[in-house]
Image (spheres, rainbow, N blue to C red):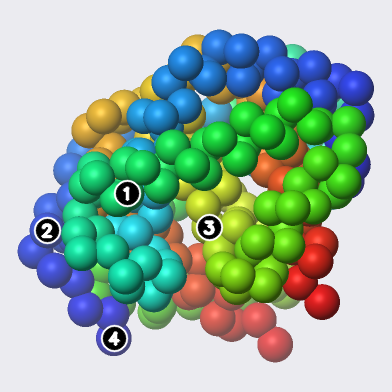
């Protein structure tokens, strides 16, 4: 299920409309993930405060969306473009790749809430494919 | 048996009391058929599903989307026994309709996203958690009679 030219154009267009809110998106998506999927808290045991919108959650949401921004810029070759991030997730962070799907879903929910007009079914399918591609690229170095 | 908190019960009742079935139902099924196009395999008799515009405009899709959403009403009324409430429907989907039960999960994800879009900021993390827990139970019950 690789990205067609139509998908890439749709993702870039949607990103151009939502990127100025990327900090807020990251904060809400991450906060939501921790509440809706409590098992994800296991990765953040070293943070003193896991409540939604706390400084650690906010900062990390920003980091994650920075990764998404990078992925948009490398949309023509996600595997190569995200190799360093993949190494980090594989060897240092060791996040179970199942969680990429969980966070992707939370990102989609937040975008649906914040940008109901722009998040058409067509934009949805392209973004879903893109996030799946990002998740796959992040898993590249795992084994 | 599934344990529901007072908050979860109240949240589910609240969401469905405010549900715009004629908008959310069609939008959800449309999104499912567009975002996961292989789900179109079950709707060969529905006519033109050629692209997302056609799917959005398709009267059969709209009608069926509303039907599916109303199908959740019984679970809302019987939250303490969703499993038995859907036993017959599960058999139907397995033996007659031959629907891969993974599709229930895909449809549930689309419903969550559409409801989030309608409710906006009212769809808090806690509300999402309750809604998704409800849908997980529904999805599990619908898949339970498959063998």
Q: Are marks 2 and 3 in contact (CB under 8 Å)?
A: no
Q: Classify mark 1: helix, strand or loop.
A: helix
A79 horizontally vs A103: left or right: right
SS for callout 4: loop
User: Do tag 1 and tag 4 residues touch (Cβ < 8 Å)?
Assistant: no
Q: Is residue B12 left or right of residue B74?
A: left
Q: Residue at x 82, y 77 (%)?
A: A143
The residue that disc 1 covers is A57
Structural distance between the alpha carbons of marks 2 and 3: 23 Å
- Which chain does the residue under circle 3 lie in? A
Q: State the residue position of label 4.
A: B1
- Mark 2 sits on what residue? B7
Q: Are marks 1 and 4 on the same chain?
A: no
Q: Nearer the viewer, residue B110 or B54?
A: B110
* Residue A135 % position (x, y): 70, 53
- Observer-nearest residue: A97 or A106? A97
Foreground: B78 or A132?
A132
Vertical position of residue B109 compared to residue B46: above or below? below
Do the residues at discs 2 and 4 belong to one chain? yes
Locate residue B110, reporting x and y percent: 55, 42
Task: Please report the residue visible at 52 percent of the width from the left and 36 percent of the height from the top.
Answer: A65
Residue bearing mark 3:
A102
Residue found at x 80% / y 17%: A9
Element type at mark 2: helix
Give me the C-alpha separation between circle 2 and circle 4: 18 Å
Image mark 1: chain = A
Mark whose residue sits in front, 3 or 1: 1
């Amino acid at each position: 299920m690789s990205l067609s030219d139509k998908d890439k154009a749709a993702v870039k267009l949607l990103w151009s409309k939502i990127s100025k809110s990327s900090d807020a998106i990251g904060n809400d998506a991450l906060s939501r993930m921790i509440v809706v999927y409590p098992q994800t808290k296991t990765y953040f045991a070293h943070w003193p405060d896991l409540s939604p919108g706390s400084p650690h959650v906010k900062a990390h949401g920003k980091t994650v969306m920075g990764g998404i921004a990078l992925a948009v810029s490398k949309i023509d070759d996600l595997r190569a473009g995200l190799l360093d991030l993949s190494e980090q997730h594989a060897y240092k962070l060791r996040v179970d790749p199942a969680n990429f799907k969980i966070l992707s879903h939370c990102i989609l929910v937040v975008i649906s809430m914040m940008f109901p007009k722009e998040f058409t079914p067509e934009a949805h399918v392209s973004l879903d494919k893109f996030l799946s591609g990002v998740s796959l690229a992040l898993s590249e170095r795992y084994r | 048996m599934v344990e529901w908190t007072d908050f979860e019960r109240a949240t589910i009742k609240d969401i469905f009391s405010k549900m715009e079935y004629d908008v959310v139902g069609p939008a959800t099924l449309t999104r499912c058929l567009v975002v996961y196009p292989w789900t179109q395999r079950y709707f060969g008799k529905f006519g033109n599903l050629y692209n997302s515009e056609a799917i959005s405009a398709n009267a059969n899709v709209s009608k069926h989307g509303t039907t599916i959403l109303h199908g959740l009403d019984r679970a809302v009324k019987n939250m303490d026994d969703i499993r038995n409430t859907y036993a017959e429907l599960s058999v139907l989907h397995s033996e007659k309709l031959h629907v891969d039960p993974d599709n229930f999960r895909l449809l549930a994800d689309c419903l969550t996203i559409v409801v989030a879009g309608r409710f906006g900021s009212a769809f808090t993390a806690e509300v999402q958690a309750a809604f998704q827990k409800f849908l997980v139970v529904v999805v599990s019950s619908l898949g339970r009679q498959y063998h």
